[in-house]
Amino acid sequence: MASVADEVLEIFAAKGEAAYYGEDVSQLEHALQAAQCAVRDRATEALVVAALVHDIGHLVEGAPEDIADQGVDARHEEVGQAWLAARFGKEVYEPAHLHVAAKRYLCATDAGYFGKLSAASVQSLALQGGPMTGEEVAAFEGNEFYREAVALRRWDDEAKIPGLVTPGLEEYRGMLEAAAKK
Ligand code: FE
């Protein structure tokens, strides 16, 4: 049986060259940049893994690239959640699951955040429900992994730099194996 690390590497090998919706990087480049940001900021290995696989729902589901243009939220975080929860512990799948909500959270709580979002990210925000209300903010802060989700969200936003050179996927094989459900 293929290990979880093999599975992740195979998915990126097969589909990682796909464009990251509306951005100038591929899915694989985006994942590697997000993971590299997590390493830079001395995140736990579980959170580095979460950063690497946070959008794997896009690749597992195979939603069309222009899904946001069609006015449909692919709800990739739900698909990704199920896929990740079958393979990793909650310290990996919860931050990944919450990373879309974290955008709505930051739009409500960080005055400078909205202005830094990319055009595609602003477009999908509307589909995702817009900034959180005060009640939603309080509920979000009740999540065990909300701080990790917010950190992941900031790396996610940063990980869109065309042509940036990063370590490759193999660099994360050991971390993936260590974080995988036994
Ligand atoms: Fe992302």
Image (cartoon, rainbow, N blue to C red):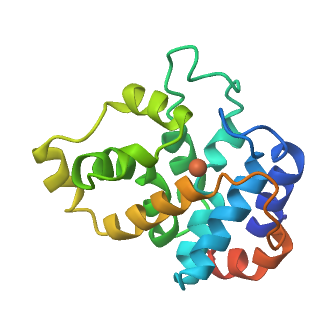
Q: Is residue 172 left or right of residue 88?
A: right
Q: Is residue 142 left or right of residue 78?
A: left
Left or right side of 35 for 174: right
Query: In front here: 7 or 27?
Result: 27
Residue 61 is situated, as x and y percent measured from the top left of the image, at 67, 35
Q: How many marks?
A: 0
Residue 13: % across, % down: 88, 52
Question: In the image as oriented, which residue stretches furthest toward the left?
Answer: 135
Q: Quadrant of the C terminus?
A: bottom right
Residue in the image at 40% along x and 69% along y: 148
Q: Is residue 61 visible?
A: yes
Q: Position of residue 67 (x, y in %)?
A: 61, 22
Which residue is located at x 54 percent, y 63 percent?
A: 155
Above or below residue 102? Residue 133 is above
Q: Position of residue 101 (x, y in %)?
A: 36, 47
Q: Is residue 5 above or below residue 162?
A: below
Q: Residue at x 46, y 57 (%)?
A: 153
Position above or below: 11 against 39: above
Looking at the picture, tell me which residue is in the foreground, 119 or 132.
119
